[in-house]
Image (tube, grey):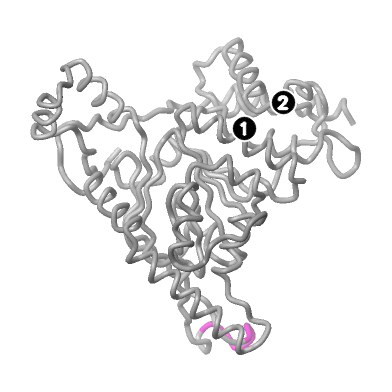
Amino acid sequence: MSLKCCPRANITSEVHYVMNVMGFSKSQVDVIQQELDETKTLSLHRVSYVVKQGAGPWWKGVCLRPEIYKTVLSNITMQLKSGQITALLGNSGSGKTSLLDVISCRSSGSVTGKVYYNNYEVTKTIIQDHASYVMQADRLLPNLTVRETLLYTSRLKLPGNTSYSDIKEKVQTVIMEMGLKNVADSRVGGQIFRGISGGERRRVTIAIQLLQNPDMVLLDEPTSGLDSHTARHLVKSLADMAHKGKIVLLTIHQPSSDIFKLLDQVAILTSGELSFCGGASELVPYFSRLGYPCPHYMNPMDHYIDLSSIDRRDKDLEVKTTERQQLFIRSFIASDINIEAEQIVIEDTLQPSRGRQLLSNKRTLGPSHLRVVYTIIRYAKIIVLAE
């Protein structure tokens, strides 16, 4: 596999000298270097995304319609690290899902800028080997139980040399991680007959993507359609998973204050640009310094998403809110938070160093054709018998 590599920063000789002067032992320095080597990073440097749109009615034909280009994302710079859960916030059309598409190499337009995973320029192969993308829709077989669904998927996804006992153990581990123990042997259900709840269906969908133990988990609106209690427990499970050493990035449209407390980082997108990206604890102080404190007893994320949006109910409101939106964007570009983040991304991805470990393929070849055919036939019989 051909990879474009920008080696990851290590502890330089100058830093070694300073740490020795400060009294750090060699073993302490080695531990710090090991932690740096083991930390996984997803870095975006000045990413922009433009799509082509047709103008005019379709019956005029492609040749007669002028081409219109729309900027979906503009100049996005951010870095995500393993052990943290990050939420992309914004109203509909702000570019949240488009950013996930760019990261996961699913974009159909023109992308400029760079996306790095562990300082290797991201390719489809790297995404397939190290990431899982949980889409918004739940596509599950209604007649299978939760356990059967995961076993069925495992036999179609995991390497061919994985034994059945290892598959069962992996499925049980994922069931416990996602809190599905009590419904493991219940049918998933669908429109015809009732099965597990909507929140549990979401957990099953996420559990399917965890079977291959990805380093990165990207989720598009995982809390959509769930009540606040179920959504909070789902995000809590994702936060626990992130804190075990994964990069977790999710989009949220209507976050609650309980969910806000579970997040490590938040990024607010407005018209394809960042109006904030940083630690969740920095959100309120940052906007307060701009003259927009969060009122007491109000959800900070709802408040600042609303302030970052354009109100098009009448012309005066549209002009006023557009000016405020542009103020937020300009202020964040010039802020210390953004400047420091950009310096970190540049230093970590664009400067050569000697301490970079090679990025190896995590996943081996998939199951054999015989296993695939056997699994499909076996579970097809189960579905027929269940009906």
Residue 356 left/right relative to 204 = left
| Residue appearing at x 63%, y 50% in the figure | 221
Q: Nearer the N terminus, badge 1 or badge 2?
A: 2
Q: Quadrant of the N terminus?
A: top left
Measured as percent of width and height from the top left, residue 65 is found at 53, 87
Question: Within 10 Å of the Cα at label 1, are there few (<14), some (14-19), or many (20+) other Cα atoms?
Answer: some
Image quarter of residue 199: top right
Instruction: Tell me, yes or no, whether the highlighted magenta stretch contains residue 291.
Output: no
Q: Disc 1 designates what residue? A: 237
Residue 98 left/right relative to 255 = left
| Residue appearing at x 42%, y 65% in the figure | 49
Between 47 and 9, the residue placed more toward the observer is 9
Rendered position, 11 above or below 23: below
Question: Which region of the structure is painted magenta?
Answer: 57-62
Q: Secondary structure at mark 2?
A: loop
Measured as percent of width and height from the top left, residue 278 is found at 43, 51
| Residue appearing at x 48%, y 67% in the figure | 272
Amino acid marked by disc 1: Ser
Measured as percent of width and height from the top left, residue 47 is found at 37, 60
Q: How many marks?
A: 2
Amino acid marked by disc 2: Leu
Question: Within 10 Å of the Cα at label 2, are there few (<14), some (14-19), or many (20+) other Cα atoms?
Answer: many
Rendered position, 361 above or below 341: above
Q: Disc 2 designates what residue? A: 180
Q: Quadrant of the C terminus?
A: top right
| Residue appearing at x 36%, y 30% in the figure | 361
Question: Which residue, as the protein is rendered here, is positioned at the far front?
Answer: 296
Q: Secondary structure at mark 1?
A: helix
Image quarter of residue 360: top left
Question: Which residue, as the protein is rendered here, is positioned at the far top?
Answer: 165
Measured as percent of width and height from the top left, residue 233 is found at 68, 35
Residue 166 left/right relative to 108 = right
